[in-house]
Image (spheres, rainbow, N blue to C red):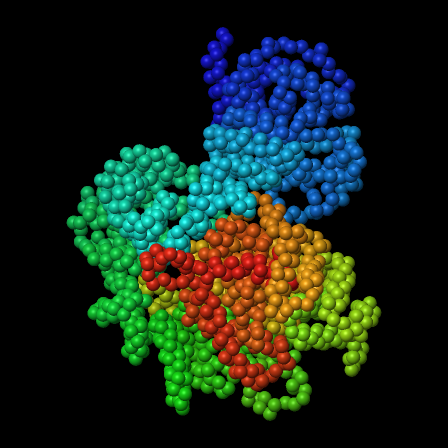
Amino acid sequence: MPLTKSERENFLWQLALFDFQRLSEVSSQALGDMICCIVLRAYGYNSSIIQEYPFGLDKCLQSKDITHNLERRDRIVKDETFHKLFVSCLLSANPFVRSLSMGIFSTQVDDCILVHEMLSNIAIKSGCRKGDFADIVGMPNRLPIDVLRQVLEADFEGLGQRLFTTVIVDVLLASGKHIGGVCLGHEGLDHQVFVTHTDGEGINLFPGCLRLNHEKREIQYHTIDLSTDEYDGGLYSSFTKVLMSERSEELYGRGRCIAAIRNLVHGDVDTCQSMLEICFQAAWQYLPGNQARASLIEPLGRLLAKPFHSQFLKARQGSQMNAVQSMLRLLVHLRPMPVIDPFLLQSLGVNYKGCNEALSLLESQYVALKTNGYDVDSPSHDLIKAIQQCYESLGDRDVSISISSAISSFPGTKFALSLDTYDLVNEATDAYLSLIDRADGNHAEFLPTECEMELWEERWVEAHKELSQWALIDEFASSTGNANLMLECAWKTNNWEKVKSLIPLPSVVASLEEGDALTKMTEIYLAIHDGNLEEVESLHAQTAQLCLHQWQLLPSVGLGSNTHNSLFQQFSRLVELRETSQIMVETSSHSARRTIPDLKVLLGSWRHRLPNSFERVSEWNDIFLWRFQIFDAISSNFSWADPNTVTTLHDRPFACISLGRTARKQGLKEVAAFSLNSLTDCTIDVEYAFLKLREQVMSFQNSSVESLKGGLNLVNSTNLSFFDSRQKSEMFRLKAYFFNALNEKPKSNQAYCHAVQICPTYARAWIDWGRLCASLSDDTRKQASEERAESKGLTKKTGLYLVQAMGCFLEAVRCDPNEQSRDHIPYCLSMLANDGPTYGNLCRTFETRSLVLPSWVWLPWIPQLLSSLCRVEARAMKAILVGILKDHPQALYYSLRSFYLERRDIERPKAQKAASPNDDDAPSSSRLAEEFMSNLRKAHPILWLRLEHILEDLIVRFRPSYEAELLHSIIALLQKASTISDHKTNRDGSTEASSQMEACTKTLAMLGVKFFHFNREKSDNSTTRKSARFHAKYASLFKSDFLENKGSNGDNLVDRLQKWKTMLELGISRVPNKSNLNEVSPSLSWFSSQAPDLWAGACESKSLTISNSQHDAPTSLDNALYKAKRSSALAAAKTNSQAVLVAANSEGLGGHTGGGAAVVEIPGQYAPTSSSVLDSRPFPELHVKLVKFHQTLELTSTSTKQHVHRITMIGSDGKKYRFLLQLAIPYWIRTDERSAQVQYVMGKALRRDSRACRRCLTTLPSVVIPVAQRMRMSANETSHQSLDSIFRHAQGPKSNRLTSYFQEKVASYLRDLGEVEEDKKNQLMKDAKLTVYQDICHKLVLPNMLSKYMMEMIPSAEHLFQFRHVFASQLAANSLLQYAFAVVERTPTRFVFCNATGKMLPQDFRSQYNHGLLEKHDVPFRMTRNIAEFIGPFLLEGVFIPSFTSISSAMHSKRSVLEPILHLLLRDDVMSWYISKSSTKNDQKMQEVERQLSDRVWSNVRFVQDRFEECSPRKVLDTAAEAIKPNPDPIDIKVRSLVDAATNAEKLSMMSSAYQSWL
């Protein structure tokens, strides 16, 4: 019986919506073929056609051989439902059905017979061979705009969960030209399909170039010659013949290749996406013009806005990509980029896992509109709102606030938002309230827009959530009718009746229907409270599904991203809700039976499942407010039991104290007090009573005098008889703090004395006492300097205070070598300078106290320990260094060896003249270093032998060639000569220019002596063949260019240096970039070491003492494990140590440690070069061991244009560790060590700062290992790129000409002006430089080279966005150090970053001194056009500036700890700089110079400290009054001014040409 019309439509609709996912692969394919046959029957499908598929060349198909056996069904074909079903045939697994359907779709012919006949005739006429398909030559020629319009207007709803982009790719490939052959791509273009033009013009890329591998991976190729038949019986050779035949143009190899690709895109999502971007971009570019492209934007928007896209979210492709996300990725790569409606993009990005792609499109629109003068920063503009909503969906709070600040019209709003950005909650609350009150006051001059008023109220509510002011928020929500906010306040204030009344409201129901997991979670709260535990399971499952759905829409978890934080917290709350249900069931049953349940396991898991200490208090409140209600319910159910028993059934004391401690540390004292005061009606034990009291006392710190007195009274009124010795010591420490804050220092000193007497092992008391003694010393020194009279008594008193402070600090490290105790080790090292030229009390105290400390605590400060060997305190360092070389030899070996060689070279000329008579009494630094090397050789003979063998080969066999060394010197001279030319261009004083020219001439003469032995008194008889060839090739030319022609000016010198640079680079370029290690160093190529299976302690020293293992002891006052007896812990540690020593002796190799210590480690695994976040005792048994060297040796160019070898070490973990072997002066090597220490100190400060931790701010120390006095080994990866290398990659050979072009243009411009007056000279010079700079920027250098390069390296918009985010924060840390330490020479070669992680590398990070003093410069750090454009305006405002300010604030908060560290680093740096500029000095001369430079060192310390302070958020006493001022500045105004200075075109144009500020 035939179907009725409605039955037919229903049948077709059910077929279109059929879910194939539920069937097996075989069943679904058979059913799909059946549906395709039903559909094609409407087009006159006949099975005989299949028999002619594929057709043969020997049997021509004529149209008369095919008869129409079926009736045309025009009405069915034109039906909308049928069209949906037909589109599904384009994704059929049957290639014959798919080709026929593609022919119908492309030709728009509604007859299978005619379509097959048309394709067959075209194929036969084209000369296709037997076995080819009918569509081997593609579809009939169509215009690209017609093809694109057809695919964009197609209805893909019937595809279900399959990607409709596959259809688009198939149609585009089928519509292309298939005529021609194929050929292989040349080197560097592998995995790409090329075509040969029929006109013989050569090889060109097929539109866009067919790149098959979507993801870029590092691929290793292994070539095997299979041309002979001995491997597979001739199978491979026959395959190559067939493959080579496809290269013929007559055989349609291109068509068969495209047909194969069309089959491939149906089976691989990544290939499909890659082909979509390539083919669509090619068709898009070949459109007639922008008008044609604009006509396609509307159908493209309609396709993206279709409501059926939600079904694609259920797809299960390998890459988890949905069709909308695929289309968004396509739009990102289209050029010119189409302009799509902002709200559509924002909605698609949030709902289809495409926020990063949507942001890329929206930001491109924003930049384009703003460049063309449009006002896109107004609140009414849809574009800026869409961008802000995308960032909010990604959890990027800082960027969202920065956008709100940018679009706000009131300066007070910007000020209040800046307070909010840096989590100054109380201050921000006052500012918002002040703005709201002023607006409500009906002031005519203060009328905010509705949008700005809503912003104030929204931020005011968020601030009060941090303050836990839920009653106040509830009052506001009731007045505004915000049902969702009222619902949140109701359950948090335990108002469950109100919760019941709010849930049925339409707005709440709408939130549930939209998938709001938090609203659904409130229903679980209500069900648990009402005792409806049966509903909890179903509600929990629904909420979990909502959270998982939201997780699916988020991008992948990336470094530095806060996108997933809120969902992590929701998942944690869901787990607790399930456990709460179990607790309520268990407590109800036990309460009915009058028995006591055992809840220790669940409560223990709750105790360990806490937010991070740096997370906001509102996140802690979400967890603890619910726990408090559960604890109250438990107490209520067991009110009949003994109070002490009830206390064991809940954990309210721990929760309240933890919340109070977190709030106090974040500056929310009111929240802390409220949390602690809630324990008044709860029975608690002594331990929690002490912790509560301690938190209450500490809340009075850093307050007014009245508050300080209140804290002191609270301590004095406390009965300490119930506390143990450690707790009593803590109370006396707090008492001493208040005395000190109230300026009663004698009483404070006495209280500290009592604290350490009560508990001598309490490190915190020792630390604070040491700080007090240090402050007393500073006060006494100031008093002595002010009196100007004889003050020997005060001077002596100052020294005694310092001795006592040093003793306290070192005793704290002995008691507990935690990170806080070790912070003061640099202070102890810095104090030694106060002894003057004699070995005084400070040195003796240091020598005595340091003997009992574990050796690992000194590892970060090894460079300072070695430099102290040149000073008076050398004797005090001896025991420390001996302990290090015994316990951690590989941490000291490289630095010690380099230091020894350096000092030996310095002191050898002095020793040849005369020997000092007091050598035995005061051994020199070189003699001490030699003694340490001897001790190392005796303690670790096998390890020493292996290390010496490796380093000797590295030093001797891996020196750069003579050409490379000379080129490095020529480049340095060229930069200096260019600077002289700049001075002349600037018309500076001729005296300075002439002196610098003389210095260049002397340097050239020294180069002649060094490389060519000119004017050398003694001839060198040990000349090698390589040296002889070098002399013969360059000696005479060097002499004629530089030594005989001395009367030339600076411009001629620059030209000749440039000529030599080009000549030497040409010679070096002929050297192969890779060579075999066996050819250079056979011994290293044979080196092999088997990494042993090490157990804990296998590398421990025989001198292991109890103090070495004390770092494992508990240190926190509220640690539950601290209840164990101290004696038992020490006994266990002692037993463990003895067992380790026995095992070490049994495995020992005649050395000082166990067998594991004899294995060579990969360098750079000890502090400060270690990148580990754990700052604790190193465990050598866990370090990566050196197994062997890679057999390929690379020759590469460094950031300083030095051509050096790159050697690769294979570690025991299977990874490759690459190191550059560079020549450098000792000052540069020591500067690299200090740079790593600065990064190490900054990393410690960031880990302790809550704002920095929230922003995931970290630093990466540079791994630079000194090999010899003039050679270093720098860690290097192939992913490390400099801005200069990217510029050369983009510009090619022209990149080297811009520097000289800039100088020539400026000089020409000034010459044309002629003689001018002196007062106008400087301004004309500035105008000339600015004109040339702008000309280069507009005509010669693109502003988006860095962006284009990174898009090539990271094609994924999601990964590129994460990279930019990390890069911006890392650049902020690097820029802050540039500004603070006056690091000016950040040329493009020194701007190095990792293109895989976004980490910035402090390459050649050296301060610039003027007579030993740091100076202020106009450009604070490098933020040139390409860098600013790559970061983008939103990440610049929302990531770079907040990160810069937060890092500076973190460093400034540690000002007292940072000061001695800066003194050590800057003292050694200034001394190294001075020695590099003068003749070498012995130890005594160096000590004299150091005393002379002491004032400059302290001036530099203050310089750096002041810069950290000024870049921190400025303090405002009255934020409420400040907010309503006419023009209040944001609290980060200083950093914003620095960014403006760094991007200012006029200031950039005045930089040296070597800076290349146009990049």
Image quarter (top left, top right, bottom left or bottom right) of the C terminus: bottom right
Q: Is residue 102 left or right of residue 521?
A: right
Establish if 1385 lies above or below 411: below
Residue positioned 58% across, 31% down in the render? 295
Residue positioned 41% across, 87% down in the render? 788
Residue positioned 31% across, 33% down in the render? 506
Q: Nearer the viewer, residue 636 or 937?
A: 636
Quarter of the image where one finds residue 976 = bottom right
Give the image location of residue 1479, x and y in percent.
Answer: 64, 81
Give the image location of residue 1171, x and y in percent.
Answer: 52, 61
Residue positioned 43% across, 44% down in the render? 379
Give the image location of residue 1069, x and y in percent.
Answer: 75, 58
- Residue 575 appears in the picture as rendered: no
Q: Nearer the viewer, residue 1230 or 593?
A: 1230
Q: Count the marks.
A: 0
Give the image location of residue 1299, x and y in percent.
Answer: 68, 60
Q: Residue furthest bottom?
A: 917
Q: Residue furthest left?
A: 640
Q: Is residue 965 left or right of residue 659?
A: right
- Residue 81 appears in the picture as rendered: yes
Establish if 74 lies above or below 621: above
Quarter of the image where one finds residue 244 = top right
